[in-house]
Amino acid sequence: MTATLVVMGSRERRADKDADFSAYMSARQAALYRTAYLLAGDHATAEDLLQNAFAKLYLSWDKVRDREALDGYVRRIMVNENNSLWRRAWKRREHSTDTMPETGVVDTYDDGMGGVLWSFVQTLPPKQRSVIVLRYYEQLSEAEIAETLGISVGTVKSQASRALAALRARAPRSLDSGGDTR
Amino acid sequence: MNHTPLEDQVHDSLHRTAAPLERAPFTVGDVRTRARQIQRRRTAAAGAAVAAVLAIAVPVGLSTVGPAQRSEVPPATQPPTPQLATGTVLVDPRSADTVDRAPVPLMDVDGPSLITPDGTIDLPKVYDTLTPYRDGWLGVAVNDAPDLPFAVIEVLDADLEVVGGGSATGGLAVRPDGQRVAWSEYDGERWQVVLADTSGGAEPVRTAFPPAPESHRVEPVGFVSEDEVAVRQFDDTLRTATYVVGSGRPVEVPGLLQAESSSPASGVVAGLSRITRQESCSAVVGASAPAGGTAWETCDHRLGAFSPSGAYVVGLDPESDGNGSPTVTVLDAATGEEVVTFEAVLPPRTVGGFWTQMAWEGDEALVVRMWQREDYHVMRLGLDGTVRRIDIPGAGVSGLSVAVPG
């Protein structure tokens, strides 16, 4: 009898956990997917990143006491998983971090530069890109970004500075020249 | 000209990109299923020495257990296989016949160990690349620690003890016959490329690049003749330049945004040639003096490794990314025409494909690493259309990696 009661208690706790988790996921999935997409650059990887992060959150649900921090937990997992994927890709010789795509048209800020900039952001090295997404999309502070990435505030600053310098070096050329490709 | 601050432009660009996305692609049930997979994987990994998951490469010249058997490497002039499949061959690891012997060296990151056709060698640490050299080995050791070079060149003796090297490197490349090796190293002021006999017979030839920071990394791409190697160099302007290095000054090879592979048999380099918003294109260019000249270009494939004879070259999906490529196409290296395409069979809603890291088994087959979400398989894809799964267990969760031309 006691054993039965224990099992029922466990089931109830599981049901409560699932209900809580389901409510959180329903509320936040679309928003967090956007972040995943900006980090990954394609839908398949974005889905994988987010599902993986949700799964890890699910496994740790009972340990995450601060419900206000759930988004940060998911973001941290996604960012680090994405950076890890890039590390694995190092030997695959993709190095898309080092080659900027060209644009085929002269863009203006309002009707094209946003897309061009996005294509440039996609070519940034993974940490720089993470910093850019967290800073300018999630609008996190430098301290929050440092905590998310597990790096110092100084490194966040230097990564952001390098990323912006890389974007700045490229963006004006897209505006000024109508060359097709290099 | 737009004068809006770049930070604001980036902010707007990211929000405009993300705003239309209203996706909620999975259910709580999907997440619970993934959670169970993670839990099983964690259980399996407990007690195993799980090293950093890195893509590990061994040059194709390494097809023997030890340095002494180097002569068994097939010659670069091996003729193409006469029987060729055409069209598309589906690759499904679940239904493929299996073989229990690796036709090319495999690396088990979690061992770490090197699995050759003739036996397994336990390694003291994880190497990105390892090849027979003199009486021992030449390797590229990798680490993730901050403030240390990501990759370091190491000379090892027959017992895998480090006896030389230690400089930051951009990697190494081995001639298909295994007789010559090239690597890059940074001396604190400039990058150098070293060309050496793997037998140690002749004095290594060093070619220095102009002084530059370490971040202007020089990476060997592969040999383009008996004694010349193609390299690529990165710089702070986010461009790469391709050079041929022999006994004199580096000679720049025009025509590529980023070199990816080369063939000493035909003296060519393949790589990205153009990237536009619509597509990315690859080309094969001549590397012999006078360097340059595009042999052919394709926007349907991203080019990979040449076969040892130079007859074929790998073509991957041009949109391939960190998830790899859904297809692998073997192209006629002289013309760019498709010979046969291998397509990964993936269950619905499953991320996967072929890793871009792969090795040629002569001119007869490709050995590739294929993945389906969290399952990894090493597959032998015969140019005659045969598909085999190489059934060798790995020591941990990372699975086995296949060889790749250096």
Image: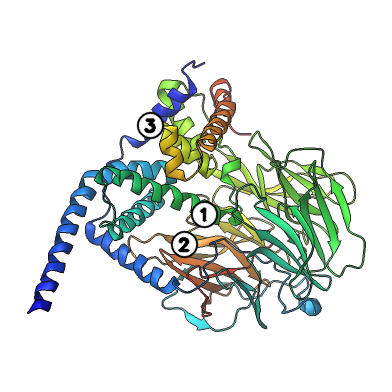
Q: Vertical placement of B31 versus B275: above or below? A: below
Residue in the foreground of this view, choosing between B351 and B344: B351
Q: Which residue is mark 1?
A: B317
Residues at discs 3 and 1 in contact (Cβ within 8 Å): no
> Mark 2: which amino acid?
Gly
User: Residue at left 76%, top 38%?
Assistant: B212
**Left or right, residue A24 beside residue A147:** left
Mark 3: few/some/many CA within 10 Å (<14, 14-19, 20+) = few
Residue B355 in view, yes or no: yes
Residue in the foreground of this view, choosing between A74 and B206: A74
x and y percentages locating residue B182 in the rendered image? 79, 58
User: Residue at left 46%, top 26%?
Assistant: A113
Q: Which residue is mark 2?
A: B353
Q: How many marks?
A: 3
**Left or right, residue B174 beside residue A175:** right
User: Spatial distance from mark 3 to mark 1, Cα to Cα?
Assistant: 35 Å
Q: Which mark is first along the chain, 1 or 2?
A: 1
Q: Which mark is residue B137?
A: none
Q: The numbered mark 1 sits on a residue in which chain?
A: B
Residue in the foreground of this view, choosing between B165 and A125: B165
Q: Which residue is mark 3?
A: A139
> Mark 3: which amino acid?
Gln
> Mark 1: which amino acid?
Asp
Residues at discs 2 and 1 in contact (Cβ within 8 Å): yes
